[in-house]
Image: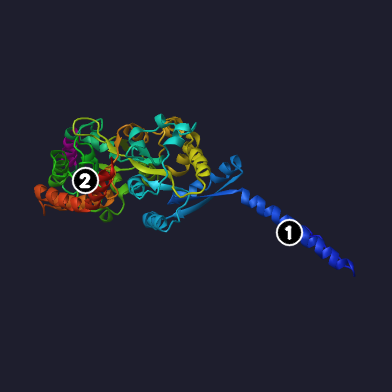
Amino acid sequence: MRREPRFFLHGGLTATLLRSLLLMGMVLGAGCAKRDDSVEVVRFWAVGSEAEIVNRFVPEFERLHPGIRIEVQQLAWSAAHEKLLTAVAGDATPDICQLGNTWIAEFAALQSLEPLDARIAASRVVDRSDYFDGIWATNVIDEVTYGVPWYVDTRLLFYRKDLLAEAGYDAPPRTWAEWHEMLRAIKKNVGPQRYSVLMPLNEFEPLQIMALQQPEPMLREDGRYGNFRSESFREALAFYKQIFDEDLAPQVTNAQISNVWLELGRGFYSFYISGPWNIGEFKRRLPPDQQGTWMTAPMPGPSGPGVSTAGGASLVIFRRSQHKDAAWKFMEFLSRADIQQRFHAATGDLPPRRTAWSGEALAGDIYSRAFREQLERVRPVPQVPEWERIMEEMRLMAERVSHGTETIDAGVARLDARVDALLEKRRWLLARRESREP
């Protein structure tokens, strides 16, 4: 057992010894304070399970950079957006943060993010050419780079290859026409109580992907107005609606599907549009005798392989940070290809760098290959702060149209009106900015 030193005070020596001890304590205390002051504390806000996993990497970084200490705070996805806005308003932002790609435009508009172009140009770690183009583009607003992709997310097809084979097809679709033909053939095989595809009515992603695959953008005039009455969006909406009209998809929300994995396993539907997290879910939830029945495939497009969403999360530095150099070092560390490979192994999140995909865990996984192919064809959504509200308006319109309570013409006209109202402040800000330009 460790014993603390003991002092025996005798008569006149007491005061002298006490003064010596007091002086020693002051010197030691000053030394400790100096050492504490020399350590730079970087506050990192991360969201969801990524916050728990990234803590495992912090000790390694701190060994490489003994003068920097990382403090990780975990945010819940449901509260992260509001907490970050509150932090910006209260001048209480962290140094570095995980930010959803669709949030970057909003926080850039608030002038709360640090531009990173100069740091990226000087970096030996963050190589712009190694990142998937569509993913990198989500971080660039008005030709200024505000974030570095941390992990990526996109949507594609999960499907029952055995049921597709029973319908007469040995490969997944590459075009809308092929997909529609396959959906009809599957429906003919499975009968009225089962379906060909699941596209939950409370999810906006399927229609958003179809719209991104079109040549015309969903917003016009630099994001000032809605463009949903365009021929391109009408074509996407008509294809989406046709799937429901022909009873190829059930008119349900995902809350009405008790277990999306087991329902695919029992053949309630044969196609499902989802993201990379479901690779692990299908591996865990389907029984061993069904593990050979499902597969992933890139999204089909109107006339060939289609694009999909450029989602995921990026790392940003807040403009008011007092530790930007230290925060950038941590951002570079998390951006290393070997760290991204280990982060994928721990989380299942897909890395945004092509070189990180050379590891055996990804290169050897048959279900991840479709995601690797799809990531070469991803496209950002319109980069306006109001986009999440616009997506919700689009989802509500699509639900009415699919139910037949609103026509396509009425739906897109109403949607454009709603979106134009949401973008009114943006038009005012852009007009004000342009009036000040020489």
Nearer to us in this view, 140 or 352? 140
Q: Classify 329 as above or below 37.
A: above
- Seen from this angle, which residue lies furthest bottom? 11
The CA distance from mark 2 to mark 1 is: 64 Å
- Seen from this angle, which residue lies furthest front? 438
Colouring: rainbow
Disc 2 residue crowd, few under 14, some 14–19, many 20+, Cα 10 Å: many
Q: Amino acid at mark 2?
A: Arg
Residue annotated with mark 2: 224
Q: Amino acid at mark 1?
A: Met
- In the drawing, does residue 404 fall left or right of residue 295? left
* Residue 150 can be seen in this image: no
Q: Which residue is located at x 15 percent, y 52 percent?
A: 417
Image x and y of residue 355, in percent: 44, 30
Q: Which residues are magenta?
A: 178-189
Per the image, label 1 sits on a secondary structure element best described as helix
Nearer to us in this view, 175 or 75? 75
* Residue 338 can be seen in this image: yes
Q: Which residue is located at x 25 percent, y 45 percent?
A: 435
Per the image, label 2 sits on a secondary structure element best described as loop
Is-magenta flag for residue 183? yes
Q: Which residue is located at x 66 percent, y 54 percent?
A: 33
Image x and y of residue 342, in percent: 49, 39
Identify the mark at residue 160; answer none if there is no mark: none
Residue annotated with mark 1: 26
Mark closest to the chain's N terminus, 2 or 1: 1
Image x and y of residue 374, in percent: 32, 34
For the residues labelled 2 and 1, say whether their Cβ atoms are less than 8 Å apart.
no
